[in-house]
Amino acid sequence: MAEKIVLIDGHSILNRAFYGVPDLTNADGLHTNAVYGFLNIMFKILDQEKPEYLTVAFDVHAPTFRHEMFEEYKGTRKPMAEELRQQVPVIKEVLQAMGVKIIEKAGLEADDILGTISRMSERRGLEVSVISGDRDLLQLATEHVKIRIPKTKKGQTEIEDYYAEDVLNVYQVTPTEFIDLKALMGDTSDNIPGLPGVGEKTATKIITEYHSIENAHEHASELKPPRASKAIIEHWDLAVLSKTLATIKLDAEIDYEFADAKLGNLYTDEAYVYFQKLQFKNLLGRFETSELSNKIEDAFETITNKEKAEQIFTDAAKAERVGIALCKNTEDVLPLFADLAEFAGIALCCSDEHVYYIKTGNDISSAWLKEQTVQLVEKNECCIFFDVKNAMGELGSLPVSHSFDGTIAAYLLNPLKSDYTGEDVARERLNLLIEDKLPDDSKACYEAYTGWKAAPILQEQLKENNMWKLFVDVEMPLVETLYDMEQCGVRVEADELKAYGEKLGVRIHELEQEIYEEAGEIFNINSPKQLGVILFEKMGLQGGRKTKTGYSTAADVLEKLAPEYPIVAKILEYRQMAKLKSTYADGLAGFIQADGRIHGKFHQTITATGRLSSAEPNLQNIPVRMELGRLIRKVFIPEDGFVFVDADYSQIELRILAHCSGDDMLINAYRQAQDIHRITASQVFHVPFDEVTDLQRRNAKAVNFGIVYGISSFGLSQDLSISRKEAAEYIDQYFLTYPGIKTFLDNTVASAREHGYVETLFGRRRPMPELKSSNYMQRSFGERVAMNAPIQGTAADIIKVAMIGVSRRLKEKQMKSRLVLQVHDELLIETYIPELEQVEEILKEEMERAADLKVPLLVDMHTGNNWYEAK
DNA sequence: TATTTCACG
DNA sequence: ACGTACGTGAAATAT
């Protein structure tokens, strides 16, 4: 068997893959579909052919790109889509990491390189496969050179193969004649003019008969139809030029050593890192994980001897810094209950030399080990954890000022990801791969090592991005505040909650029966699919809107139908009740602990903007807008002897907008007036303040909200149920009234486009990859996000600062009152009644002084015996 | 696991 | 001609 070589037309295959594979992005927002498709095609070919040599050729300058679908647009060349452009360097890096020979040369097309190498290979006696999406390459086919054209059909890649005889069979011309064919018919996508009036049919006829344009030219007078005869005489120069253009060079001057193209092990450690970064999970299986060797594993050492452990703690206390990771035994525990797993040991790392895993056992008790660890954090001022708050849950309170949370650092550096585990940080910041299925103790060792090794890097990167202060002064201290809040929880009356749920249950049952009656059948009202069929097909209601899967039955659609159809009104009421019962009445009840309180979690590394999020249960979306739902807040009560004080910022986001934009009109509006929506209405609609109608005020309010969300006429029109044109007029009027805001928003988007991120007043960043998208929707979304993120994010920064201030002062004065909830612009304090006045003063002071803006930060405060009363 | 709906700021 | 307001989490059904 002869040896084989595979030659790939890099850009052509990448282009094919880009349009053939649905859009994919990795956690960093990098588009990866073309790279993924390319690799799939390449692997498929390599699996089939098992070649000895492999080379990928790229054009050096590929400013434009075309695709089948664009070929119909005559002569136009679209610039390469940004999503594709950004993948070009990626595929090159990945190939390099796999040790694949890449060849590109200025002034040469990839075609010419492929042609030249294919002839060189043939002379060496190799069997050649040329992979391209481009039929031009068919001219290279011979008995030993096979042109392979991948086609993506129904998600499956099929490959068309052409040896010389296949070209003849399909096109009735030899590969060499294929050039002449092209010279006559031209190729708009390749800027080959061809002869006017000669298309594929005529050209094929001429070439099959005369075999070359030269011979055809000599017999010009015989050519049929006469149109072609005339064309070849009058435009002979064009034909000659076209032939030159269409001819692929077979003797280009390139330096090419077959030894460099020899195919080795593609599945290198380096490539594995790339595949992980790109999140090509099903391609990772191709790597033999056993080959991955991280030398650091040699430094792992398990300690079971107490004296040795004591020595390690003593040394660690004096170390410059120490990485610490808890280890739980998850072996016998279902992943679902991982939280319940038993504490099994601690990993410590203070150098490359040793990573200790101190294991609980006969000699070493859990309590002792935890105690030692807490003392270590008290002594060593730089203890690195991943998720300090979680560690505190395990070990008890720790001095957070001595901690460095790698999870939070990684979140600040890129808040768009979903995970910030030690493993992620190792991969992203250390280029260190950690195998998937390791025992718990090895995982802990890796985590401790990663913390120790990555902390200086994370610190450096935070400093480079101007977020070190934010990290040290806001995010890290906040960990302790959140830990305290979670520990404290909020008291909820289980009996009252149950009664509330039962009341809802009765009404739900009534409504159910009435709905079935009117529908004439029993169906699942909770199923949008079934409901849609009943309403829009069986009952024939008009005005249905589509979703991906069927009719939309969302509230805004049903509300329009409700006045006319009683069943729709009942469905809406049913929905409301069902929501209240399932999510709130029943849902919350399940979270009440033995102490009569709900200990929800506050997550610090979830949102893209810097806000907190609340879960298990979500205490930031307890009903308030509708009275019936609002009643549920009566079951949130303070401990005996305490009251609730609820404080919320008044329109903090608009005030931030006023400050950041520096718009004089808005700033003055805030300095003088209470009712900003009314004053906005007065200014925008040119009406005296006292004569603003309710409708005008409502409209102005919607515009104010819209501005904060990154206004669009469509969104506003939806919200106000007005035409897009009217909405656009409101917006124009608004920007005319507040020109500074218009300028600010425009500048923000422009800066986002230039730098690739936006930032808050406190320096928090949000990367903005969407802005470079060629997709209108995605780009528009990016623009709205760019306008919203700095505002929402600054508000998040401000209340975080306030929370730290409030909890610090409550602790300093050793008060019994404590912060229990945060709802984005609102804080709830469970206040010891004797401390009430002091608490009110602290709250107001700390919240108002959290930022120094050009407009005052106002706080509204209420007191009550439950959350309903205090709000 | 994905989709739809809806609660909050 | 396109089709959406920004940021979350939970429950239910459908796949």
Image (tube, coloured by chain):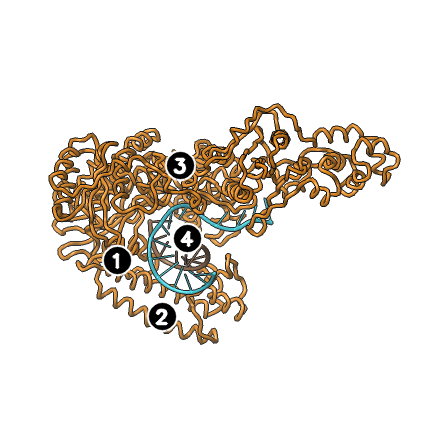
Chain colours: A orange, B brown, C cyan
Mark 1 belongs to which subunit?
A
Circle 1 is placed at which residue position? Answer: A868
Query: Which one is earlier in the sequence, the residue at label 1 or at label 3?
Result: 3
Circles 4 and 1 in contact, beta carbons < 8 Å = no
Label 4 sits on a secondary structure element that is helix
Closer to the eye: label 2 or 3:
3
Q: Is residue A309 left or right of residue C12?
A: left
Label 3 sits on a secondary structure element that is helix
Q: CA distance from mark 2 to mark 3?
A: 59 Å
In the rendered image, residue A26, in percent from the top left (x then y), is placed at 43, 42
Mark 4 belongs to which subunit?
A
Mark 3 belongs to which subunit?
A
Q: Which amino acid does the dot numbered 3 rest on?
A: Asp
Circle 3 is placed at which residue position? Answer: A269
- Name the quarter where the C terminus of chain A is drawn: bottom left
Circles 4 and 2 in contact, beta carbons < 8 Å = no
Would you call the spot at circle 3 few (<14 residues within 10 Å), some (14-19), or many (20 or more)? many
